[in-house]
Amino acid sequence: MKLKKYLAMILIAVMACCLATACGSSDSGEEAASDETAVEKTDVKIGVRSDLIDYYNAIEPVLQAKGYNPEMVSFDDSIQPNVALAEGSIDINWFQHEPYLTAYNAENGTDFVMVQPKTYAPLFAMYSTKHKSVEELPDGAVIGVCNDATNQDRGLKMLADNGLITLDESVEVATVHDIKDNPHNFTFQEAEMQMLPQSIDDLDAICLAGQHMVNAGNDPSAYLIKSSDEQEYAVGFVVSAENADAAWAKDIAETAQCDELAAALEEVSGGALLPVWK
């Protein structure tokens, strides 16, 4: 009787071990599945705006050399790349700066995240055909500034950073009405940014994005001063919140900071778009 009881105890112990092993195998399987899920993506759909395709083409072979299989999806406006990201039809997009992204998230209830590091920034500067330096600007000079809120703010803050005017610091987005000190009695003339290059000979100076100087056949590097906010307005890769810490996304952003992109920016934009890592 005691022997039967002893054998039964051994049998129970063996069964317990088998169950534990089975559970261990299950846990291992779950861990393996988790590891499989954690394996980094190689097939990546990248949304870009159609006017930026040349820059995507510059980085595509570099990404392929890193083992990625990138697929470009182009859009004709600045809305659809974010719509596609929300729908999941693309994995990442590359066309916007953080102020635009922040405004888009606020207006649409999205939680997209910009991946670091960023890639390139639009040059924003002051240009003149009458004066060779800001020191030559006369009292009472007429300065052309953009009539849209974002770029007027950039222009005025550029002037303030260079000690030409003082702005009301309590205002987040400055306009000409927020100038507190104007020691040189500058007069500000507002116009659409694409129209300012046409007025450059009639004004003492204009403040605008360098790309519009290129569009007008002018040299964007021939500026008097330039803004120091490149990082704020730098274009970067954007993902949904769930991929904010994804290693593949960060790797793509880092890989894009390459000589091939820098060369394409110089060739295509004529120096109006600046690589932020240079």
Image: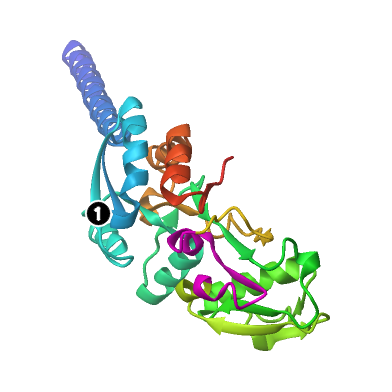
Of residue 45 and residue 181, the one placed in the foreground of this image is 181
Q: At numbered mark 1, what does the secondary structure look like: helix, strand or loop?
A: strand
Q: How many marks?
A: 1
The one of 51 and 120 positioned closer to us in this rendering: 51
Number of other residues with Cα within 10 Å of mark 1, as a class: few under 14, some 14 to 19, many 20 or more:
some
Residue type for callout 1:
Ser
State the image coordinates of residue 142 (x, y, percent, origin top left).
Answer: 68, 81
Q: x, y (%) of residue 80?
A: 27, 64
Q: Is residue 19 visible?
A: yes
Quadrant for residue 100, please give it.
bottom left
Residue at 60% across, 70% down: 207
Residue 17 vs 211, above or below: the answer is: above
Q: Which residue is mark 1?
A: 74
Q: Residue at x 65, y 83 (%)?
A: 188
Q: Position of residue 103 (x, y in %)?
A: 45, 72
Q: Residue furthest top?
A: 3
Quarter of the image with the C terminus is: top right
In the depicted structure, whether residue 73 falls above or below residue 8: below
Q: Is residue 108 left or right of residue 156?
A: left
In this rendering, position of residue 277 left or right of residue 140: left
**Residue 172: in sight, yes or no?**
no
Residue furthest out toward the right: 183
Q: Depth check: give the residue in front, 101 or 16.
A: 101
Q: Magenta segment range?
A: 197-217
Residue displayed at 66% across by 58% down: 228
Image spot of residue 47 (x, y percent): 29, 52
Would you say residue 18 sits in the magenta stretch? no
Residue 212 part of the magenta-drawn span: yes
Q: Quadrant of the N terminus?
A: top left
Q: Is residue 179 above or below residue 219?
A: below
Residue ranking furthest to the bottom? 177
Q: Nearer the viewer, residue 223 or 77?
A: 223
